[in-house]
Image: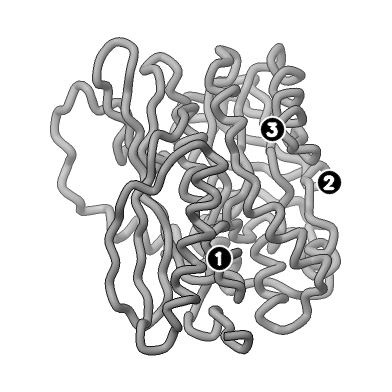
């Protein structure tokens, strides 16, 4: 049991497993149109975090699913990270979770039952912290370990925070530090310190429940969570959905301390390169931008922070809400304005 390393069973881990943005776009390009569903408030049209369906004038259901292969070797930590990441999509819509269903794929001929049970227990512990139950699920026998959740939540139809509703003049606030992908790459290479591992798990298991408070703020116009496409990829979803241009300050970005040292030393992920290849044409970098800075901007986050677009009048309240919920690193990283949908890094 003590010698089992979950990451040895998978070719990728965490949100770094996501299909590259450009490839995903090609796959979905010829998908059949959704048709006319007046009560489907959010579907696939703007690459939002979850689907939202209006039940009545005061209630809408949020539905999402998220799962991946191990990003860490510890079974309980893997379950916690995967569950936290899955529930984040509900918070990113401004809603609160109601219950979850487990998605489980395990190589049952390679992993002891106790290890599989510990993965599920990790996920259940996060759901308890969120005040919900894992009410069921589905399991299959697979060649690589897979775990995640279907998340069901609720939100008032007028308080849905679409990623496409940002407005000119909005500021951009990021709730968690970057660097999860870099730390995961170092872990696989045996170069991550115990302190770095603890920082990685702490960041990735911090529930983005502050999204409920932010959802009640009229000055918050748009939200998304930063995951496998990196900060630039998910910010591009906001600007494309809203038809705006973004400017961010690379020196303002919060970064996990050990991740900063590692990325400067050349540690990165293959997913960061795939991300840049997918959307680099829509990003303007400064001439003196170092390669490590670009890799950080594209670093795939697993259970990353909320990225919030709000008016300047609400900026202080948004930052105060983050800090009241334990997100001490939350900071304003840039702004939005009229212009071609692209990101300028300063």
Front of the two marks 2 and 3:
3
Instruction: Name the foreground residue: 28 vs 340.
Output: 28
Instruction: Name the foreground residue: 339 vs 118.
Output: 118
- The residue drawn where x is 57% and y is 30% is 211
**Mark 3 touching mark 1, by CB under 8 A?**
no
Horizontal side of residue 270 vs 62, given as left or right: right
Count residues near mark 3 (Cα–Cα under 10 Å), then give few for <14, some for 14-19, many for 20+: many
Secondary structure under tag 1 reads helix
**Mark 1 touching mark 2, by CB under 8 A?**
no
What residue did someone put label 1 on? 78
Above-or-below relation of 275 to 141: above
Q: Which mark is residue 251?
A: 2
Instruction: Name the foreground residue: 157 vs 128.
Output: 128
The quarter in which the C terminus is drawn is top right
What residue did someone put label 3 on? 173
Residue 320: x percent and y percent? 76, 23
Residue 127: x percent and y percent? 49, 46
Count residues near mark 1 (Cα–Cα under 10 Å), then give few for <14, some for 14-19, many for 20+: many
Residue 314: x percent and y percent? 69, 15
**Label 1 – label 2 distance at C-alpha:** 31 Å
């Amino acid at each position: 049991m003590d010698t089992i390393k979950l990451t040895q069973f998978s070719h990728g881990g965490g949100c770094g497993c996501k299909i590259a943005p450009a490839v995903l776009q090609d796959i979905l390009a010829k998908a059949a149109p959704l048709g006319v569903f007046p009560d489907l408030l959010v579907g696939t049209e703007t690459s939002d975090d979850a689907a939202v369906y209006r039940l009545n004038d005061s209630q809408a259901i949020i539905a999402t699913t998220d799962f991946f292969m191990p990003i860490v070797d510890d079974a309980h930590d893997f379950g916690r990270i995967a569950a936290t990441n899955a529930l984040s999509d509900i918070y990113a819509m401004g809603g609160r979770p109601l219950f979850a269903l487990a998605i489980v794929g395990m190589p049952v001929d390679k992993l002891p039952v106790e290890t599989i049970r510990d993965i599920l227990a990790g996920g259940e512990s996060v759901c308890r912290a969120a005040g919900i139950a894992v009410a069921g699920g589905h399991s299959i026998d697979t060649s690589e370990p897979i775990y995640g959740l279907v998340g069901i939540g609720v939100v008032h139809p007028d308080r849905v925070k679409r990623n496409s509703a940002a407005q000119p003049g909005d500021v951009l606030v990021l709730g968690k530090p970057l660097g999860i992908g870099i730390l995961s790459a170092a872990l696989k290479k045996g170069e991550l310190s115990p302190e770095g591992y603890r920082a990685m798990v702490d960041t990735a298991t911090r529930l983005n429940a502050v999204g409920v408070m932010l959802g009640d703020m009229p000055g918050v116009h748009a939200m998304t969570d930063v995951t496998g496409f990196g900060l630039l990829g998910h910010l591009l979803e906001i600007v494309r959905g809203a038809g705006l241009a973004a400017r961010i300050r690379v020196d303002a970005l919060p970064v996990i301390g050990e991740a900063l040292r590692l990325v400067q030393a050349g540690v990165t992920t293959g997913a960061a390169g795939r991300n840049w290849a997918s959307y680099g044409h829509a990003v303007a970098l400064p001439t003196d931008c170092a390669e490590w800075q670009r890799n950080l901007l594209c670093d795939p986050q697993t259970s990353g922070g909320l990225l919030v677009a709000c008016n300047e009048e609400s900026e202080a309240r948004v930052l105060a809400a983050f800090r009241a919920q334990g997100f001490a690193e939350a900071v304003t990283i840039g702004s939005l304005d009229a212009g071609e949908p692209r990101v300028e890094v300063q």
